[in-house]
Image (spheres, grey):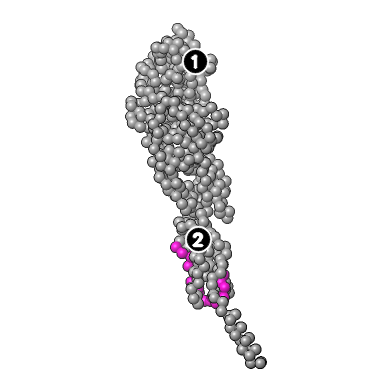
Amino acid sequence: MRTLVALALFLGADAGCGTDATVSGVFPAEGFTGRTMRVEISGDATEWSGSPGVNMGQGVTVSNVTVASPTSLFVDITIDASASLGTRDITVSNDGTFTLKSSFLIESPIELLFDGVVAQGGAPYFAINNRDIETPFDLTSGDTPSGFANLELTTPGGTQFVVTDSTAYQLKGYALIDADATPGPVSIASGFTGHEVAFNLGADVDITARSPMALTDGATGTLAATGDSQLYAVSIAASPSLMRVTASTSNPDGKPITSLLPGGHWMNASGASLAVVNGAGSVDVVVFDAGTAGGYNYNVASKVEALASAAEPSSANDTPASALDATALPFAQVPAELSAATDQDVIKVVLATAGVIHVSAHSTDDLTDTAVDILSNAGGNPSVLTNYTTVPVNQAVCIPVFGIGCGEDVTSPMVPAGTYFVVISAGDDFVSTDQAYTALVFLN
């Protein structure tokens, strides 16, 4: 009897030793691309010793493998900035080969969100969230296009991401997407030269391709969400032409904006509400929401006219008697300059019928400060036809659209047929080093 009991105990003990050795876990179980970290790999019934081999797949470099116990390893891993996202297998080679399937997750350290349609010719709003709390964005300011000395944002070709608000863990702004832009990656390099940290999105921004619709006067459309846009094209027959496209809405919260995209590129953008087009052909126009609302309808007013032009005379044109004749309206005096703070340039305008005279005087470099008055031809004592009766109109503001410089944008009241004079003089902030400007005269 004692022999049978001993045999039973022996067999029971042998059965308990049959557990298979496996990799049972990893901590932490996730990491960001472009980062180095230390992880612990746990085993079950393993007998690890010596120098085990550890593999976590392409894009992950393993180093400094340390055996803490027969069932525990510590390893340093470096995840490549361009490593593919998703889960990885972990394989340990030591006294056998052990694999833990889909056990380690590789993620992007940033998240990109949009408000508005992400499409060719669009201007959606974006937010880039930094998910790596241990690595804040370096927001050191600098004299660079982005305004940051140690932060470089790389976006798909044909796009420009303009940052308007920033914290160590979020960048916000708007994205300008050219009419021929294609999908591509987004990445950020943060930190001073030689010590940059990569923040790769790890996926392409999906830019929807779209063809512009023909724009006609009176066209209507809908901006369904904040940051939405519609892409149009206008056919220009004469060169140069003055192009005016405006969008309006009855929604008190809506603010549709129009912009002209020469060549389909935002870097050439100007306000479509007032733009000089120097070439015949098709020109793209974008109607987009200014970030105020969504879900509203808009109406478009569009007008294209051949533009007459003449250079400022070489002799003085600073009185009505010596004024430059506007041979036809619309008219551009270009090139032109104010040679001194006391200089003024006068343009003569003859109306065959009643109308509202509109004058825009601006510098293409935002530097030359001008002032504008519109005068009647009332003998030797002409009256001022603007709201400013004692000083020239000097708004000292920028026309709030892309590509148009600072300057004046003024109108007369409705006036009868007759002769009138536009007087352009130096504004309060005029300096002698900044003299060049362009003057446009047209009828509303």
- Residue 47 lies in the magenta-colored region: yes
The residue wearing badge 1 is: 413
Q: Would you name the residue on which mark 2 appears?
A: 87
| Callout 2 amino acid | Thr
Mark toward the start of the polypeptide (2 vs 1): 2
Above or below, 366 against 115 in this view is above
Task: Assign the C terminus to one quadrant of the image.
Answer: top left
- The rendered magenta stretch, by its main secondary structure, is classed as loop
Q: Nearer the viewer, residue 282 or 143?
A: 282
- Residue 178 seen in the figure: no
Viewer-proximal residue, 186 or 219?
219
Q: Position of residue 190 (x, y in %)?
A: 51, 51
Give me the residue at 55% from left, 34% from top: 292
Residue visible at 47% across and 50% down?
187
Quarter of image, res 72: bottom right
Q: Which residues are magenta?
A: 42-58
What is the secondary structure assignment of the residue under circle 2?
Answer: strand
Residue at coordinates 51% horizontally, 63% vertically from top-left?
102
For the residues marked 2 and 1, what is the alpha-carbon distance in whole angstroms?
Answer: 70 Å
Residue that appears at 33% across and 27% down: 237
Q: Is residue 108 above or below residue 285?
A: below
